[in-house]
Image: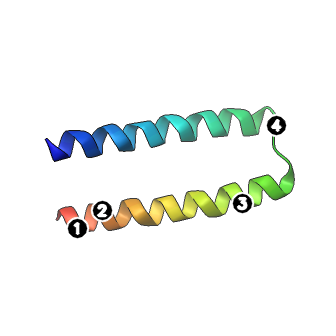
């Protein structure tokens, strides 16, 4: 059950990231927004890596 919940949350994050990329490509963001977004995405990647390592 926990695996399904985690899978659903990761899927939601992926969908949100796709939407952010789409908006970025439509030039909705300022340069400073893009810098902050990149930092946040790096943090998310690190959190996901920790979750993957804990699972193993």
Where is residue 6 shown, x and y percent of the image? 28, 46
Within-10-Å neighbours for mark 4: few <14, some 14–19, many 20+: few
Callout 3: SS = helix
Callout 4: SS = loop
Q: CA distance from mark 1 to mark 2?
A: 5 Å
**Rendered position, 26 above or below 14:** above
Callout 2: SS = helix
Residue linked to disc 1: 54
Q: What residue lies at 79% left-to-right and 31% top-to-bottom? A: 26
Within-10-Å neighbours for mark 1: few <14, some 14–19, many 20+: few
Are discs 1 and 2 less than 8 Å apart at CB? yes
Residue linked to disc 2: 51
Callout 1: SS = helix
Are discs 2 and 3 less than 8 Å apart at CB? no
Residue linked to disc 3: 36
Q: CA distance from mark 3 to mark 1?
A: 27 Å
Q: Quadrant of the N terminus?
A: top left
Q: What residue lies at 17% left-to-right and 46% top-to-bottom? A: 2
Viewer-side residue, 1 vs 32: 1
Q: CA distance from mark 2 to mark 4?
A: 32 Å
Q: Earlier in the sequence, mark 3 or mark 1?
A: 3
Where is residue 31 shown, x and y percent of the image? 85, 54
Question: Which image quadrant is residue 11 in?
Answer: top left
**Farthest residue, direction left:** 1
Within-10-Å neighbours for mark 2: few <14, some 14–19, many 20+: few
Q: Earlier in the sequence, mark 4 or mark 3?
A: 4
């Amino acid at each position: 059950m926990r695996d399904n919940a985690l899978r659903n949350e990761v899927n939601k994050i992926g969908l949100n990231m796709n939407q952010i990329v789409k908006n970025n490509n439509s030039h909705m963001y300022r340069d400073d927004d893009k810098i902050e977004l990149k930092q946040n995405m790096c943090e998310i990647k690190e959190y996901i890596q920790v979750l993957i390592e804990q699972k193993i």
